[in-house]
Image (tube, coloured by chain):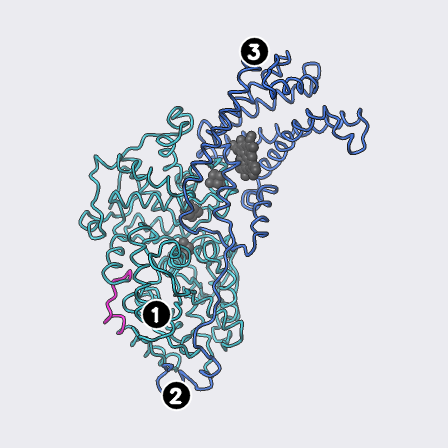
Chain colours: A blue, B cyan
Amino acid sequence: MAYFIGQILPYITVTVFVLGVLWRLWRWAAARIVHDITLSPFPQTKGEVLGIYLREIILFRNLFKFDLPLWVGAWPMHMALFGVLGGHVVGIYFLGKQFVYLGASEELSKHLSELLGTVMGTIFLAGLLYLLYRRAAIDRVRQVSNPSDYLMILLLIAIVSVGDFMRFFPAYGIEYEPVREWFYTLATFQPAAIPDNPFFILHILLVQVLIMIFPFSKLMHLFGMFGMRWIVNRVQREPAPGLPNVDVAAARAKGIGLPQAGAGDAA
Amino acid sequence: MPEYKGLKIPARATDEEMRKIHIEPVPDEQKVDKAIQYLDEIRKKFRSFVLAMESCVKCGACAENCHTYLGTRDPNNIPTMRAELMRKIYRRYFTPEGRWFGKLVGAQDLDLDTIMQWYSYFYQCNECRRCGHVCPFGIDTCEVTMIGRQILHWLGIVPKLHASVGASMERTGNHTGLTKAAIVDTLEFLSEEIRDEFGVEVTFPVDKEGADILYVPSSADFLLNPYTLMGAGMFFTYIGANWTISSHMTEAGNFGLLFDQQHTMRHLFTRLLHTAQQLGVKKIVWGECGHGWRAWKMYLKGMADLPLRWEITHIHNEVAYYIETNQLKLDPYKIGRPVTLHDPCNYVRACNLAETLRKVIRACVADFREMYPNREDNFCCGGGSAILFDDPEMYQLRIKFSAKKAEQVRATGVGKDGNGILCAPCSICKAQLYPMVEEHELGVEVKGLIDLVGMALVWR
Ligand code: HEM
Ligand code: SF4
Ligand code: SF4
Ligand code: SF4
């Protein structure tokens, strides 16, 4: 089992993910933007368009403005998610010593790395629990939910819980070094055995499930948001106003429309 | 009363009426197969639609932001649920997860009942795009509604109202079936009205070859909103324009946008281009109509079969330009009544007119009060996409759809003394709001924006 999860499944996972996402993106790209459905006010420059993208991705501004209670859970959850993702890459690659480059000692850097990971992981879990509660408790959100919407959050909760558990109880946790070693063997197509820690193996298994269903689930919103904004937020300029052969001053001087000037029709 | 298994549905066009708009209704036993075929064709074409199908996270942020849900609390009026009526079918037939894990991901086989649900709920959507505006990703449920209505149209399921307007567009070039005689008559009558009420001489040139400007009014202005036409006539006369109205193409709206964005919409597009060429005009100016302006401003360029040789601007843009350049003398104290502005969704979310409306209204009235939310955040009046059905049950829905608007108007206080003005510069908004301000007892009179311009002009 550990052999399958650690040495075979990763390749299947990556293949399914990459092909799945490419297939979906291709399907989107094959359909066209048939009509101009830019949302106004129209951005006047590419910079303004970029501004809209950034404020939605970094701040979730629409949620903040139109559904604050949702933002309260969604934004921290996503920021922690991005933090955790980045943290995994950096932490594992530098073995937690990344902050040495910012002037910290090795010891301090490792502590910082662990602290940050723990904080992010906790916010992540809290955000997910909040979103799960919201989905089940608020009528209108429950009404719009399919079973898969709950399963998605539950899966994420499972992944994060196992991760947080390893953090909070280092005795059951795992060091950065063996993980990096193992990734390295995977990347060079000479897969070694996965580090022998049941929690770590479970964590890796669940993550792979998540990555495999990614292209076939609503997680595609990661790309969908760019696709949709590309359609509705674009530069649009207005045609120049001003009417041909119109001289208002002359018309008023002539008194066009006033009874004594005769018929009101302009020449 | 039309009803289908408890669903609220508008009266349907008969098969005979469908044939008048060139559709041979699909027999019931073939409807499901045909619908899937049409859906397959459309999903391969429209990216906005595919993205709405594939990237919603069901966060529910759109729910409290759709006035139809606020007014009815019917879960199927939550924008994402409206889209889900289509999405569950889309998933079932066009995605692997839907094919293999049907129930789990909410996929479902198509049947006649679902098609009738489409008919009910896609015609309870005002196509106002507030959902697209608030969605964190910009998912525009209006696109799903439009495609739903397109498929229904091809199946032969269209409200009587929309089908009859479609037929009249082809017959006369306008929605209300005005003939040239009726147009000329009404305009002569309006000239007299202007003379009596404002003491100025305005004539409305019809089909004048060699005019510089073609003004395209909403045909509803001839019957329901005379002050909008009078205002436009006074504006063009005041600035000394060489303008005309065409009896061949007297329609600022385009119902094609609302039920058939192919044949019907294109018919009117082509008609305009032919007319402009024949009259030899230099510029085309558009009258007050929200969905219509969206169709002409945003859709024409992608659909015209002929090169576009004319710039088309909206009359509000032109009036604002002459106000900004100090060429119009307007007396804001002539209209001594409190005024609030309903932002037509199509103007403020699809056509960038929000600030223009304000430039004009501020110059025309002294006591202008914003309603909240306004501009692109505004709520629809409940008439959008011409779901102006009169059958008693549908009429009740219209009252509910306008509840949010009524609340907004009330909060401005303009109707407190019963002499307020609710400026709603869109033909469909006007048609919806004339009865709704009475239903909700708002103490306001509904007017267009050009109406106010005409009233405020200072001629000497
Ligand atoms: C640019 C990147 C992303 C943006 C802008 C973004 C934005 C959003 C927004 C606005 C929502 C709706 C609010 C909510 O329900 O929380 C949402 C939901 C969600 N996002 Fe993301 N997201 C991004 C990436 C991701 C990634 C990579 C994941 C994957 C692990 C993810 C997982 C989720 C989940 C599971 C939900 C649904 C939460 C619920 O059911 O309530 N997101 N996302
Ligand atoms: S706001 Fe957008 S993502 Fe959220 S449920 Fe509505 S359509 Fe879906
Ligand atoms: S377009 Fe308007 S009426 Fe239709 S679903 Fe969206 S918000 Fe509701
Ligand atoms: S009828 Fe008026 S308010 Fe309603 S959608 Fe049209 S423009 Fe919007």
**Same chain assignment for discs 1 and 3:** no
Element type at mark 2: helix
Question: Image check: B362 left or right of A199?
Answer: left
Element type at mark 3: helix
The subunit carrying tag 1 is B
User: Which residue in the rendered view is the most extreme toward the left?
Assistant: B16
Residue at x-position 46% and y-position 77%: B457
Asked whether disc 2 touches disc 3, contact meaning CB atoms under 8 Å apart, the reply is: no
Q: Is residue B232 above or below residue A174?
A: below
**Same chain assignment for discs 2 and 3:** yes
Residue B109 position within the rendered picture, expressed as x and y whole percent measured from the top left: 32, 30
**Residue under circle 2?**
A261
* Numbered tag placed on residue A3 in the rendering: 3
Q: Which residues are magenta?
A: B174-184
Q: Is residue A139 magenta?
A: no
Cα distance between the residues tagged 2 and 1: 25 Å
Q: Is residue B180 magenta?
A: yes
Asked whether disc 2 touches disc 1, contact meaning CB atoms under 8 Å apart, the reply is: no
Looking at the picture, which amino acid does disc 3 mark?
A: Tyr
* Numbered tag placed on residue B226 in the rendering: 1
